[in-house]
Image: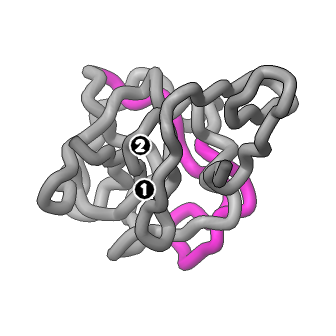
Amino acid sequence: MKCSPGLIWNQQILQCDWIGDEQIINSTTTIHDCPENEVSYDNHCYYLDGSGGKCSYGYSRASESILIQISKLFIGKNYKTAISDNCCIWTTDLYQNYYISAHCNKHGPFTKGPENLNGCINQTNQYPRQMTFCGSH
């Protein structure tokens, strides 16, 4: 069984499994390959981009609740197409509460995943290159 980066096959529970410092991620669905700089989770592909709230065809902004689950999987990834001009992450949620602190507005790879820290709590930024969290349909 092939697991996405950051996940390992757990023979005891027969699924991909990842235990991070603060969270546990289990994926019971089939993992498929995603394009470069994207993360596979629950049979969808997700990416971060400096696209000002816009996502590629076949993708749309995704929920912060998913971002929370897969944040550490973005370590080693990079922006999908463009570097951001603001590091608060635009999702489908009303407010932005997560951001990239390492490699903020700079070419990656990211050395930390999105974090929930004081820099972006209850923000509604919409800069032209606002960091955006997108997921496949």
Q: Tell me the magenta residue range.
A: 95-114
Q: CA distance from mark 1 to mark 2?
A: 8 Å
Judge whether 136 appears above or below 27 on screen.
below
The one of 105 and 7 positioned closer to us in this rendering: 7
The one of 11 and 42 positioned closer to us in this rendering: 11
Judge whether 124 appears above or below 56 on screen.
above
User: Which residue is denoted by mark 1 in the rendering?
Assistant: 48
Q: Nearer the viewer, mark 1 or mark 2?
A: 1
Examine the image and state in which quarter residue 8 appears: top right
- SS type, badge 2: strand
- SS type, badge 1: strand
* Picture residue at 59% right of the left edge, 66% below the top: 77
108 drawn magenta: yes
Within 10 Å of the Cα at label 1, are there few (<14), some (14-19), or many (20+) other Cα atoms? many
Q: Could you tell me residue 59's position as x and y percent?
A: 21, 50
The one of 132 and 4 positioned closer to us in this rendering: 4
